[in-house]
Image (cartoon, grey):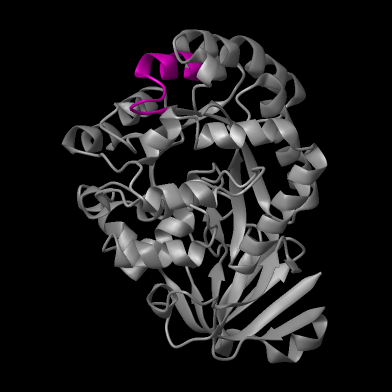
Amino acid sequence: MLILINNIKELVQVEDDPKKWVAGSEMAKIDTIKDAWLLIEDDRIAGFGLMKDLNISTIDEYDKVIDATGRFVFPSFVDSHTHLVYPASREIEYIDKIRGLSYEEIAERGGGILNSAKKMQEISEDELLESALKRLNEIIGYGTGAVEIKSGYGLTTESELKMLRVIKKLKERSPLTIKSTFLGAHSIPMEYRNSQHKYVDLVINEMLPQLADEGLADFIDVFCDKGFFTVEDTERILEAGEKYGLRGKIHANELDFSRGIQVGVKYNALSVDHLEYTGDEEIEALLGSETMPTILPGAAFFLGMIYAPARKMIDAGLPIALASDFNPGSSPSGNMQLILSMASILYKMLPEEAINATTLNTAYAMGLSHELGSIAVGKKANVFITNDIPTYEFMPYYYGSNKVDTVILNGEII
């Protein structure tokens, strides 16, 4: 199957020599081609260039020709942190937040994650699968081409395995590129509140062997933060995950200076995520590491928290990735166009920095920057064509509306 997209107003995020990520001042640079063409062969990007260099006489050789006059073509967004497999929404807790209850207060009385865990035990795999598929189709429409999905609303072996099996089925049924993360250490069940180490034992000795035996996870995660799992808990779980070939992706420093960033770097985690509490010591630990700092604007915005110091981190020379944290309790949206806008509005990131953070860098945070995150020959053909817009800067500027016209995933028009 040969698809030619021609007369592209501007082809965004092109790479002749693909990079695994961009950091520091390089984040403010993206390469584009104006008046461009893009060729897709089967599920791969086969070529691109200037329209003046395209041999028009060969136009009949293509199976499909798309005229993109007045429109831009971007690599699809990559969303490296979500919890979009969940049993029910939690808008009642949203009202509690409006009335002044904190995230920690809601969790302490059995709400939050524990609320979802209770409902997870009651829902069937089929119901869970169908609701998640609807959410996946929604985010495809906003331009997302790859997504990481975590377990963590199970908190029992049976329910955690249920979630992971659903994610495995989603991989088979959705055109999205999907990675699965085991997050058994998402919260501490009420019955283990006075014996937290016993729950960690359950995660390590019962959950991990079973999910590994079924090949249900690509990564392992721990919520290393105040009121949740300690550095010592996190180290035990990460070491256990390593034995099964599962690299870490850590919830870190959302609620306090938890040293979750440092433990993530120590164990070569692929990413450390949230990062509201990031200071000089944390930045120093991340510099020179292979761990991607990942900010989740939706959660900080929805919970009314402080914002991670993105500008300080970039100015220090770090790379930054941005993801949606799509979940029912603290970020009920998987719209990566909104995350792109939040990057500029809330975190003072330039449009180019925001584009890099939602494509190439977040592809790295999923272990996929060799496959996704930019327009490069040989990479997977996951792209979207915009509506008629004036500039690529218009994408973060014009927030609130869907600017995607056509989605192509794996070389197929969706």
Q: Quadrant of residue 142?
A: bottom right
Residue 21 visible in the shown view: no
Residue 196 in percent (x, y) is at 46, 12
Residue 409 in percent (x, y) is at 69, 63
Quadrant for the N terminus in the image = bottom right
Residue 332 visible in the shown view: yes
Determine whether, in the image, residue 42 is placed left or right of residue 197. Answer: right
Quadrant for the C terminus in the image = bottom right
Residue 224 in percent (x, y) is at 39, 27
Question: Which residue appears at 70% of the width and 50% of the height?
Answer: 132
Instruction: Choose between 255 and 108: the one closer to the eye.
Output: 108
For the view shown, which residue lies furthest in the left direction? 280
Question: Which residue appears at 19% of the width and 38% of the height?
Answer: 279
Q: Is residue 54 above or below residue 24?
A: below
Question: Which residue appears at 29% of the width and 46% of the height?
Answer: 318
Task: Reply yes or no: does residue 28 show up in magenta.
Answer: no
Residue 79 in percent (x, y) is at 53, 52
Determine whether, in the image, residue 335 is placed left or right of residue 218. Answer: left
Q: Is residue 297 above or below residue 345?
A: above
Instruction: Choose between 253 and 228: the one closer to the eye.
Output: 228
What is the number of callouts on the image?
A: 0
Q: Which residues are magenta?
A: 224-238
